[in-house]
Amino acid sequence: MLAPNLTPEEIEVIKLSCQVASFSLLINLVPAIGMGWLLARKDFWGKSLFETLVFLPLVLPPVVPGYILLVLFGNEGLIGKYLTKMGFELAFNWKGAVLASAVMGFPLMVQSARLAIELVDKRLEITAMTLGASHLRTFFQVTLPLSGAGIVIGAILSFCRSLGEFGATITFVGNIEGETRTLPLAIYSLLQQPDSDSQIMRLLVLSVGIAFMALWLSQWYGRYRKRKLA
């Protein structure tokens, strides 16, 4: 019902938001699963400190990771200045928005993957290895399928987190129309303009609708997997 009333600018904002969230999820997927497995299955010196660093973005004010990204990957940053010379700029464009969203969504997905893997009975993995399966084969044929539901739910939640990312994004890449202005930034911009209530309401409804559907899907999938495995 709301779609025919969307302006071209609003459609562009939605497309950009989904693009940024999708790419950030793709970037996070494999590293987050690997990190989740590491934290769930391995003990090592300094693990508590390592875990703290991994999950730190969850509790920091989002502008702090955003500023750190700016210092590291800005056009004159410690790493960014070399990337700029190679023609790959991250600051103040959509690729930087992907990086900011990925950084903020990574801990959430790691935690989901970790909890899902911890619920897999280690005896099943040990049995597979005693039957001749390698560690890698055991992971792909035993651990990953059994923890798949939790990983999928974590991926959905990470996608939603990326859709709602604001603080790190605006700090690192700014609020550039058509380039970095995702849904939260677009709503923020409209709040600064007079007589924009109808536009704000449309974007709010869309934001809530997308987030609601994604969360509903994660809950439905979790229940579906439980029924299938019962």
Image: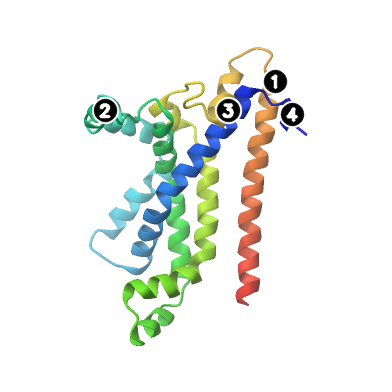
Q: Name the residue under label 2.
A: 84
- Crowd tier of the residue under label 3, counting other residues whose Cα lies within 10 Å: few below 14, some 14–19, many 20 or above: some
- Crowd tier of the residue under label 1, counting other residues whose Cα lies within 10 Å: few below 14, some 14–19, many 20 or above: few
* 204 sits to left or right of 124: right
Label 2: state its secondary structure.
Answer: helix
- Closer to the camera, 122 or 24? 24
Marks 2 and 3, the one that precedes in the sequence: 3
Residue 2 bears which disc, if any? none
Q: Residue drawn 59% across and 33% down?
A: 14
Label 1: state its secondary structure.
Answer: helix
Q: Which amino acid does label 4 sit on?
A: Pro
Circles 3, 1 touching at the beta carbon (< 8 Å): no
Residue 4 bears which disc, if any? 4
Residue 197 bears which disc, if any? 1
Marks 4 and 2, the one that precedes in the sequence: 4
Q: What residue type is labelled 1?
A: Asp
Quadrant hosting residue 217: bottom right
Q: Residue drawn 33% across and 63% down?
A: 38
Residue at the far right: name it. 1
What distance separates the C-alpha of mark 2 from that of mark 3?
27 Å
What distance separates the C-alpha of mark 3 from that of mark 4?
14 Å
Which quadrant does the C terminus fall into? bottom right
Residue 12 bears which disc, if any? 3
